[in-house]
Image (cartoon, rainbow, N blue to C red):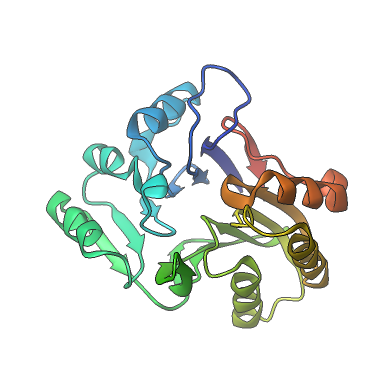
Amino acid sequence: MNIKVVFNSDRIKEDFSIGWGLSLLLDDKILFDTGESAKSLINNMNKMEIDISLIEAVVISHDHWDHTGGLWEILKQRPNINVYGCPGFGVAFKDKISDISAKLIEDDNFTLVTSGIYSTGEIIGEYKGEDISEQALIIKTDKGFSVITGCAHPGIIKILERVRMQLSLKEFYTVLGGFHLKDYSIKDVKEIVKKFTELKVMRVGPTHCSGSDAEQIFQEKYGNAFIEAKVGQVISV
């Protein structure tokens, strides 16, 4: 299965739009998060020759502006598709989905999105002293199980341990996305990297809110198994 990096803060070519936020397209049909800007998202999709009419569903990790910015334009072009959210998402987000007539699917449990792609269901974390609802995606291929995260506000290790227990996993093929380690100390990041190895994560791609220090530490540890996630790249899992 291929994952296309549709929006992020770095790019492989100058004509791609960049900014704050994340958006990944799985198997050309499941869009995970939508970045900060509809204009930027659509530009990148056009440059990558992505056919929006093939998108079957959108999964939103959490309802922050840098992950929902392009959603409304996608829903204008693909009305009535499923949008996967969490029960704890804000009222404004849910009302806007309802106004557009898309179908909002809210689950706090393990959920099938499409063949080989699952949501973890709602996981509660903390952001600026308040609870935040977030979900991650699980991908099953012949290479193994991979996990895709938006910001990992509940904690990247907490998310991985939940998936490991849900599926009785002994290893992860790839863990990719925002790990929200940008404000962590070097010592704490190194402890998390150590935990990754204990969880037998084979490939890793920290990006977005993971922070440059964390990216460097992961890269030093994982070497050739470190994945960059620049706009325009296609990652195989």
Q: Quadrant of residue 62?
A: bottom left
- Residue located at (51% from left, 44% from top): 24
Between 3 and 180, the one lying in front of the other is 180
Between 152 and 214, the one lying in front of the other is 214
Q: Where is residue 139 in the image (x, y as percent from the top left)?
A: 59, 60
Q: Position of residue 52 (x, y in %)?
A: 36, 35
Q: Is residue 19 above or below residue 215?
A: above
- Residue located at (45% from left, 31% from top): 50
- Residue located at (26% from left, 43% from top): 72
Q: Position of residue 227 (x, y in %)?
A: 73, 44
- Residue located at (36% from left, 61% from top): 84
- Give left or right: position of 187 versus 136: right
Q: In this view, does 193 lie above or below 81?
A: below
Q: In this view, does 167 lie above or below 17?
A: below
Q: In which quarter of the image is residue 157?
A: bottom right
Between 233 and 80, the one lying in front of the other is 233
Total label count?
0
Q: Position of residue 120 (x, y in %)?
A: 50, 71
| Residue extending furthest toward the top | 15
Q: Is residue 184 above or below residue 154?
A: above
- Give left or right: position of 108 versus 27: left
- Give left or right: position of 108 versus 8: left
